Amino acid sequence: MKCSNAKPSRTGWLYLTGILDLYRRKIWAMGPRIDTELVLNAFHMAVRHRQPPRGLLFHSDRGVQSASADYRGALGQAGRVASMSRQGNGYDNAAMESFWSTLKWELVFRRHFASRLQAQSEIFDYLEVFHNRQRSHSALNFGSPVDFELQIN
């Protein structure tokens, strides 16, 4: 993940693309380059794992990757509706920005990663073991995303 206060690993930056399922609070995808392919991988992973209904509103930031023809085409083919706030209006993206802040303070700023592989492993562990299975979320009545899923299924 590249952010203004973070340092790269000895082998370079690791970029994290987040797709936050607002209902279940789960998140996905990492790669060595911040490009449309990374965003598409995250989108396809989220759709494969969640199987959301056609017509779902899919909100993103105004980054060039999210505005690319390839990404917008993939959304359209999958029957999802693209949504971006106008410049300077970040309220629609507030939940995602809150996640980035939490990830940075709970993990990234506390560590120096020797390699992309180490960063990827530790971030994956944070997401899959801690964030999705153990961390309480106020939006989920202070339960974890996995506990919430078990309750609704």
Image (spheres, grey):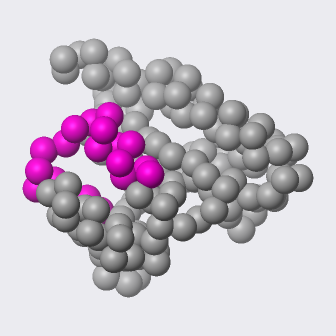
The answer to whether residue 96 is above or below residue 105 is: below
Q: Quadrant of residue 148?
A: top left
Q: Quadrant of residue 2?
A: bottom right
Q: Residue at x 35, y 70 (%)?
A: 70
Q: How many marks?
A: 0
Q: Is residue 94 visible?
A: yes
Q: Is residue 139 visible?
A: no
Of the 4 image quadrants, the one containing the N terminus is bottom right
Percent x, y of residue 128: 52, 28
The boundaries of the magenta stretch are 41-59
Q: Is residue 72 magenta?
A: no
Percent x, y of residue 40: 41, 58
Whether residue 2 sits left or right of residue 84 in the image: it is right
The answer to whether residue 81 is above or below residue 96 is: below
Q: Is residue 44 magenta?
A: yes
The answer to whether residue 48 is above or below residue 74 is: above
Q: Residue furthest bottom?
A: 87
Q: Residue at x 89, y 52 (%)?
A: 10
Whether residue 130 sits left or right of residue 94 in the image: it is right
Q: Nearer the viewer, residue 137 or 131?
A: 131
Percent x, y of residue 103: 60, 45
